[in-house]
């Protein structure tokens, strides 16, 4: 069997190998991804984002159990930035999610590194596609929401869950700007802590303000209160996700089409940017041009970045 056939048949080892190759950017990957692509499009992708430590992994873990009760198969991707804040998170996630390791219906993978040129999207998209082709019914993707990433996951998922905890008033303010774009569902986790109700009220106000501005958006942006460590509120979260899914699938205002188009567009642009940059850097390397020399020339003001870019493009994209 070819690796593509193995993955489509749900083979765990072949899948793990490909995911590793994606991480290592092996040259064999694009061809395999091409052949896998026709087998994608069946999984439902749910993104979880929020600040470090708010309980994303705990929620994902509980939700995976909930989907398993319905006999749905689950893929879990935990994307960790190489940030000092979350240095221990991968190991922590492994231990926490250990109970799933004996369950063949759950496939877990931690993605420790970002793309070569920053940003996590390219590999994340690829990995989502692999788990999709592998036949997972539901794919749960956890990313630490630091600025750009929460937008990126919103571009890859059907439903995006933004996780916060009580007493993060500043964060609620920070969410404000992009609130309608980022989250479809808001979770206030650690509801055992003080101030949960207040945080919910603040979120509700922000959402209502946003909704009034955007009349085309008929989705009501649900807020769910959870205590993930005790599995409290998980059923409500599950129902909220189901509700958003039903909303998308109705597609009466083209809402599912919008999601699929946003995803395809994002994936295309990411791949294009990535490939173009890689091609140019490869060619520069083959020519013996050093990036460091250019950087030094810019720092010393001998050159400027603008004319350098024009020069490189003119030369390498001929
Ligand atoms: N009190 C309380 N603690 C919780 C709750 N949910 C999670 N925790 C704890 O919060 C800590 C962080 O939980 P994680 O699930 O690792 O959080 P995370 O958002 O995945 O963290 P990073 O991946 O590092 O960003 C752990 O010690 C959890 O046990 C909750 O509802 N209440
Ligand atoms: Mg985590």
Image (cartoon, rainbow, N blue to C red):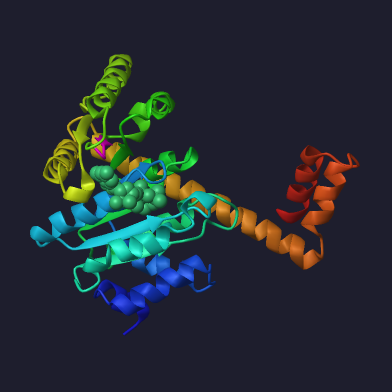
Measured as percent of width and height from the top left, residue 269 is found at 50, 46
Can the viewer see residue 158 in this picture?
Answer: no
Residue that extends furthest to the bottom in the rendered view of this protein: 1
Q: Is residue 243 above or below residue 78?
A: above
**Residue pictured at 44% horizontal, 50% vertical:** 267
Please give left or right for residue 175 compared with residue 107 in the image.
right
Q: Name the chief secondary structure element in magenta.
A: strand
**The one of 106 and 255 positioned closer to us in this rendering:** 106
Q: Quadrant of the N terminus?
A: bottom left
Q: Position of residue 117 (x, y in %)?
A: 60, 53
The answer to whether residue 90 is left or right of residue 248 is right
Q: Quadrant of the C terminus?
A: bottom right
| Side (left or right) of 49 relative to 59 | right
Q: Please, is residue 205 above or below residue 297 in the view?
A: above
State the image coordinates of residue 216 (x, y, percent, origin top left). 27, 21
Q: Is residue 272 above or below residue 15?
A: above
Q: Nearer the viewer, residue 267 or 166?
A: 166
Q: Quick check: can you spot residue 15?
A: yes
The residue lying toward the viewer, choosing from 259 and 243, is 243
6 sits to left or right of 300: left
Q: How many marks?
A: 0
**Residue 99 location in percent, x, y?**
22, 67
Instruction: Determine the residue located farthest toward the right in the rendered image.
Output: 302
Q: Which residues are magenta?
A: 186-190
> Residue at the location (53% across, 55% down)?
82
User: Is 181 in the magenta?
Assistant: no
């Amino acid at each position: 069997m070819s690796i593509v056939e193995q993955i489509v048949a749900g083979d765990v080892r072949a899948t793990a190998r490909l995911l590793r190759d994606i991480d290592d950017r092996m040259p064999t990957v694009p061809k395999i991804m091409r052949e896998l692509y026709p087998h994608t499009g069946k999984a439902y992708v749910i993104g979880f984002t929020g600040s470090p430590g708010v309980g994303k992994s705990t929620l994902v873990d509980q939700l995976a159990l909930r989907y398993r009760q319905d006999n749905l198969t689950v893929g879990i991707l935990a994307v960790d930035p190489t940030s000092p804040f979350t240095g221990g998170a991968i190991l922590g996630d492994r231990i926490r999610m250990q109970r799933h390791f004996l369950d063949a219906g759950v496939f877990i993978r931690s993605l420790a590194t970002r793309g070569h040129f920053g940003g996590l999207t390219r590999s994340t998209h690829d990995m989502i596609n692999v788990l999709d082709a592998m036949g997972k019914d539901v794919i749960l993707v956890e990313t630490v929401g630091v600025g750009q990433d929460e937008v990126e996951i919103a571009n890859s998922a059907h439903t995006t869950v933004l996780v916060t905890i009580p007493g993060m008033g500043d964060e609620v303010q920070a969410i404000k700007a992009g609130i309608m774009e980022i989250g479809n569902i808001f979770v206030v986790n650690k509801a055992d802590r003080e101030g949960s109700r207040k945080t919910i009220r603040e979120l509700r106000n922000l959402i209502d303000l946003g909704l009034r501005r955007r009349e085309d958006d008929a989705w009501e942006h649900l807020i769910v209160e959870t205590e993930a460590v005790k599995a409290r509120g998980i059923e409500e979260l599950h129902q909220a996700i189901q509700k958003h899914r039903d909303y998308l699938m109705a597609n009466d205002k083209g809402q599912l089409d919008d999601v699929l188009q946003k995803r395809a567009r994002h994936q295309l642009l990411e791949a294009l940017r990535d490939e173009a940059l890689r091609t140019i850097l490869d060619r520069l390397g083959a020519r013996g041009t050093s990036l460091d020399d250019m950087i030094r020339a810019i720092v010393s003001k001998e050159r400027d970045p603008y004319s350098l870019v024009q020069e490189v493009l003119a030369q390498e994209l001929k």
